[in-house]
Amino acid sequence: MVREVLGTESPRSLLVVAGATASGKGALARELALRLDGEIVSADSRKIYRGLDIGTAKPSVQDQAAIPHHLLDCCDPGARFSAAEFVHRADSVIADIVSRGRLPIVCGGTGLYIRSLLRGIIDTPPRDDAMRAELLEQEKQQAGFLHQRLSRLDPKSAARIPAGDSLRLVRALEVLALSGKALSDFHAEHGLAEERYRSFQLIPNWAPEILRKRVAERVERMLQAGWLAEVRRLRSEGASSALDVVGYKQLAAHLDGSMSLSEARDAITTAHWRYAKQQLTWFKGQNDMRWLPTPVNVDEVEAEVRQFLLEAGA
């Protein structure tokens, strides 16, 4: 069983800047880091991979030179990197940042990473690759199978997980099969866990039509920045597992001749917009999020963060 690792000392204070892809959370985190003497701890399940730079919107070399960034480029594409591994590494990084008198700013859109860091890892069974492969094959043969099955067996989890989110659907079914207990029950019990950190959590709150436009614009910027060349390089290096990541998969299909660049662009934009909606659904289910009016007034946010730090004694 995977278990949380809890510190024995009093909770440290940190800032969290979360949100959907293309919401501007990275730019906001960097601006606050400059103003508040902070360092950024990435909470992004794609930015951990080496070589996936343009397509994951990693901070530029210039940004990383100006502000220390942590938990980027942790492993090669395809390597397993669990939420438990993230928490272990993030705890160490945060302790180091605090020891130097600076503010840890956790920034990213992987909700599971952020929740696990703040509340600990839920004690659920480890993954079962054979079961996962079987469930995904059934979904391939019958679209909608996973969500329909979970709706019968664990309706609370099914109501929370979008029908197109195969990985989370598989995980919920896997947990139920291996433990005999619904994932929603694990979540309900874990909701009583003490917080591991004192946190102030921010999320830019764009209107859906504006966020969708921002997603499309960001995809175009990444293509203009050389994303296709990055995919070519990864293919030449034999990093085939990298090409399972959203965006990389579609550009690889273009290079294989199965879709035009325009079709790939449209498919990537659609996939990223779908992912953004899933992220927002996740964060709306979390407590204590400060949803920021947009465009964000950084001066006002800075004042709120300073007040939080003052009250927390940080």
Image: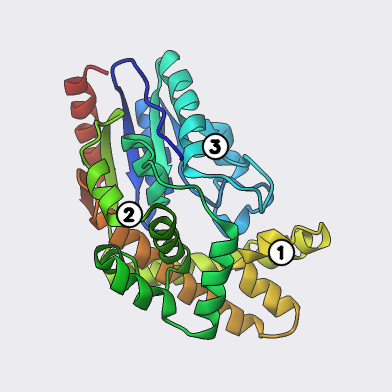
Q: Which residue is mark 2?
A: 181
In the rendering, which numbered label is found on residue 231?
1
Crowdedness near tag 1: few (<14), some (14–19) or many (≥20) residues, C-alpha within 10 Å: many
Tell me: residue 239, above or below residue 193: below
**x then y, percent, for residue 312:** 21, 22
The residue at which mark 3 appears reads as 71
Drawn side of residue 202 relative to residue 168, left or right: left
Image: 241 above or below 38: below
Discs 2/1, front: 2
- Amino acid carrying label 3: it is Leu
Residue at image coords 52%, 68%: 219
Cα distance between the residues tagged 2 and 3: 33 Å
Q: Position of residue 107 (x, y in %)?
A: 41, 42
Helix, strand or loop status at disc 1 = helix
Q: Tell which residue pokes out farthest to the right in this image.
A: 236
Which amino acid is tagged 2?
A: Lys
Residue 27 appears in view = no
Question: Mark 3 vs mark 1: which is more N-terminal?
Answer: 3
Q: Is residue 137 above or below residue 276?
A: below
* Residue 106 seen in the current view: yes
Of 62 and 166, which appears nearest the observer? Answer: 166
The quarter of the picture where residue 23 lies is bottom left
Q: Earlier in the sequence, mark 2 or mark 1?
A: 2
**Mark nearer the N terminus (2 vs 3):** 3
Mark in front: 3 vs 1: 3
Q: Residue at the spot x=61%, y=48% of the render?
A: 80
Q: What element does badge 3 sit on?
A: loop
- Where disc 2 sits, the SS reads loop
**Lateral position of residue 21 relative to residue 231, left or right:** left
Colouring style? rainbow
Which numbered mark, 2 or 3, is in the foreground of this view?
2
Label 2 Cα neighbours within 10 Å, binned few <14 / some 14-19 / many ≥20: some
